[in-house]
């Protein structure tokens, strides 16, 4: 097995997972629970040394993990072996207060060491039972997943992303007449963690569960999510249960808009107030992942999840006289739309403003985003907008790369072997909001230094002074910096010749993809950088060498670098773009070749020779 998986420490010989369903009863009536039982047989294949195996199982307030056991060969239980613990879940600096992970760990003492472990997970409510992924971070020889579906339960099991994998589906009947659906997957490679990978639902094989209905013991049929209308009806039942008290936020709302003359000014005042004054904390799973907190509680606590913030924004806009509505959606990390209804479709909530026949999608969790703008992570996403007992389906806009334009213009001359001149740099879109947000988080006494480090790239060879900025309080339009610049160590003077490197940024110079990478590379957003640098040719010199131009244009990215002589100036122009925020794995070889040409151009110097 070591020859088959030479870079892995451990492998699964056999993983078996079963799902069963039961009708249970509480004060609210009957409901369907799901029980997952899983056993994984782990073998160390690393040729030498010890390995510490670890894994985790996610759960929340609507589920629980129990029954963890460890086994040696022949199912001999190891009663004083391994370690388990529960921990809260945090991602990208955001605390997910309802999500937890159950961690399992045990030592393996050498090649051929075998340990199996099993656990049970109970979903207290079937609504949150959405999918099963076959892969682990280590390879697996055999994965078997079975669902025993009773006659009273109507669900569909849909294999997603199964192309190219050895996954077989079979159906049998139990003695009780239940349908047993089994999926067998063979020889699965490890799902290695790779930076900037797309969401797992785009590429990993998994079973998507479409929950349709169940029949209780009295013979009454209960719809789950057979249609999108049923999904909305459940969402609607949660929003109707919000105990909003708009009177608690009326004074603040009216104070924000009292001096505003236009509708746009009123909307901006409210939208930006929520961005600036409410801290974002995520509630990832369970009922808290779908039911918004009341507006007055979010207002009072000054923090909330996306649903609480969207609800507060909606209620404030309604007080101000606008038609604002709660809106469900999944971010770009989720591959699903509303074709097959499920709570797995939606992981986010925003507020939609209806005005003058247009829909404005407002996400108050996006700090410093302007009215009318939409963050890349929710662009071109299907959304469900509340409309009383009905709903509207729509799609958020998708902006071209130019939304994120970064433009730099510099006019250099040579003084004392330095490149000295004046520069202007502007940012829009994601770059703008990032700078504004970062700037707001910096202490006042170091803000000036932070701006300098941003402009000079924290490069000791670059000095900037006389910095003038646009108004950072104004979220509309671009932000820009005008400044004086002086750069050392970009010029070699040999008396009769000067060798000059004009481009001091050299973006993507070393950004190539390793041949071992298995997944597409996804940027946080589209990228578009335009740069123009002019260098005045000193009196008594002429241009004797210009670096070669580079031009590579594809549907996903483009690089354009060019030098020209115009009168007594050398003009360098560079346009770099990532058009769709993603570089497919199929393009990696072509990308690497393009980067080689870009790197060569960066390393080639402009040569001025004495006349």
Image: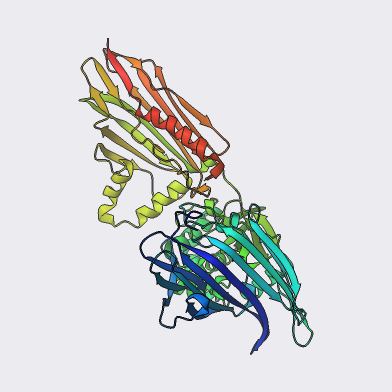
Residue lying furthest bottom in this view? 27
Q: Residue furthest right?
A: 219
Please state if 62 lies on the left or on the right of 605 as rendered: right
Image: 595 above or below 178: above
Front in this rendered view, residue 448 or 543: 543
Occupied quadrant, residue 565: top left
| 468 versus 550 height, above or below | below
| Residue positioned 37% across, 35% down in the render | 506
Q: Which residue is at the front of the view, 249 or 77?
A: 77
Q: Colour mode?
A: rainbow
Residue 79: percent from left, percent from top = 44, 83
Task: Tell me where residue 476 appears, x and y as whole percent.
Answer: 47, 48
Whether residue 317 is visible, yes or no, is yes
Residue 575 spot, x, y in % from top left: 46, 32
Residue 323 shows in the view: no
Q: Using the rendered view, name the quadrant where residue 213 is placed.
A: bottom right
Most foreground residue, 582 or 140: 140
Figure label count: 0
Residue drawn where x is 36% and y is 36% of the image: 505
Q: Is residue 99 left or right of residue 490?
A: right
The answer to whether 99 is drawn above or below residue 436 in the figure is below
Which residue is more in the foreground, 439 or 192?
Answer: 192
Q: Position of residue 126 (x, y in %)?
A: 64, 76
Which quadrant of the rendered structure holds the C terminus?
top left
């Amino acid at each position: 097995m070591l020859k088959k998986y030479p870079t892995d420490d451990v492998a699964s010989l056999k993983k078996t997972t079963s799902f069963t369903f039961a009708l249970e009863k509480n004060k609210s009536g009957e409901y369907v629970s799901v029980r997952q039982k899983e056993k994984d047989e782990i073998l160390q294949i690393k040729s030498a040394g010890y390995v510490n195996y670890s894994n985790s199982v996610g759960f929340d307030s609507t589920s629980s993990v129990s029954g963890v056991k460890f086994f040696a060969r022949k199912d001999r239980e190891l009663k004083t072996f391994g370690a388990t613990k529960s921990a809260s879940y945090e991602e990208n600096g955001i605390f997910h207060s309802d999500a937890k992970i159950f961690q399992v760990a045990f030592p393996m003492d050498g090649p051929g060491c075998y340990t199996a472990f099993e656990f049970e997970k109970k979903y207290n409510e079937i609504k949150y039972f959405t999918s099963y992924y076959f892969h682990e971070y280590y390879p697996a020889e055999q994965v078997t997943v079975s669902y025993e579906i009773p006659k009273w339960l109507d669900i569909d099991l849909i294999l997603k992303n199964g192309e190219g994998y050895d996954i077989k589906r079979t159906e049998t009947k139990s003695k009780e007449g239940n349908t047993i659906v089994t999926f067998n997957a063979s020889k699965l490679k490890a799902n290695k963690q790779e930076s900037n990978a797309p969401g797992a639902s785009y590429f990993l094989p998994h079973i998507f569960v479409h929950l349709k209905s169940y029949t209780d013991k009295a013979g009454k049929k209960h719809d789950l999510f057979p249609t999108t209308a049923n999904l909305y009806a459940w969402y609607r039942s949660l929003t109707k249960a919000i105990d909003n008290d708009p009177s608690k936020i009326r004074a603040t709302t009216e104070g924000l808009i009292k001096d505003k003359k236009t509708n746009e000014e009123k909307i901006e005042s409210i939208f930006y107030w929520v961005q600036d004054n409410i801290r974002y904390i995520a509630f990832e799973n369970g009922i808290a992942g779908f039911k918004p907190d009341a507006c007055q509680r979010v207002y009072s606590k000054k923090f909330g999840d996306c649903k609480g913030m969207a609800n507060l924004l909606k209620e404030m806009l309604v007080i101000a006289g606008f038609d604002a509505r709660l809106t469900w959606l999944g971010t770009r990390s989720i591959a699903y739309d509303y074709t097959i209804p499920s709570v797995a479709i939606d992981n986010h909530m925003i507020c939609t403003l209806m005005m003058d026949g247009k829909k404005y999608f407002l996400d108050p969790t996006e700090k410093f985003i302007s009215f009318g703008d939409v963050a890349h992570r929710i662009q071109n996403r299907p959304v469900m907008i509340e409309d009383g007992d009905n709903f509207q389906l729509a799609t958020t806009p998708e902006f071209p790369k130019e939304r994120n334009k970064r433009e730099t213009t510099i006019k250099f001359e040579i003084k004392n072997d330095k490149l000295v001149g004046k520069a202007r740099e502007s940012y829009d879109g994601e770059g703008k909001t990032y700078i504004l947000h970062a700037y707001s988080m910096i202490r006042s006494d170091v803000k000036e230094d932070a701006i300098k480090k941003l402009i000079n790239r924290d490069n000791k060879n670059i000095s900037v002074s006389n910095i003038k900025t646009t108004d950072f309080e104004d979220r509309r339009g671009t932000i820009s910096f005008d400044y004086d610049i002086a750069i050392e160590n970009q010029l070699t003077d040999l008396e009769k010749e000067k060798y000059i490197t004009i481009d001091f940024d050299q973006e993507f110079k070393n950004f190539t993809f390793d041949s071992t990478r298995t997944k597409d590379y996804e940027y946080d957003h589209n990228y578009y950088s335009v740069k123009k640098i002019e260098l005045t040719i000193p009196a008594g010199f002429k241009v004797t060498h210009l670096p070669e131009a580079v031009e590579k244009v594809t549907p996903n990215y483009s690089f354009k670098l060019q030098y020209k002589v115009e009168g007594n100036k050398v003009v360098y122009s560079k346009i770099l773009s990532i058009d769709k925020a993603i570089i497919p794995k199929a393009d990696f070889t072509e990308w690497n070749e393009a980067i080689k040409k870009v790197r060569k151009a960066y390393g080639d110097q402009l040569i001025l020779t004495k006349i």
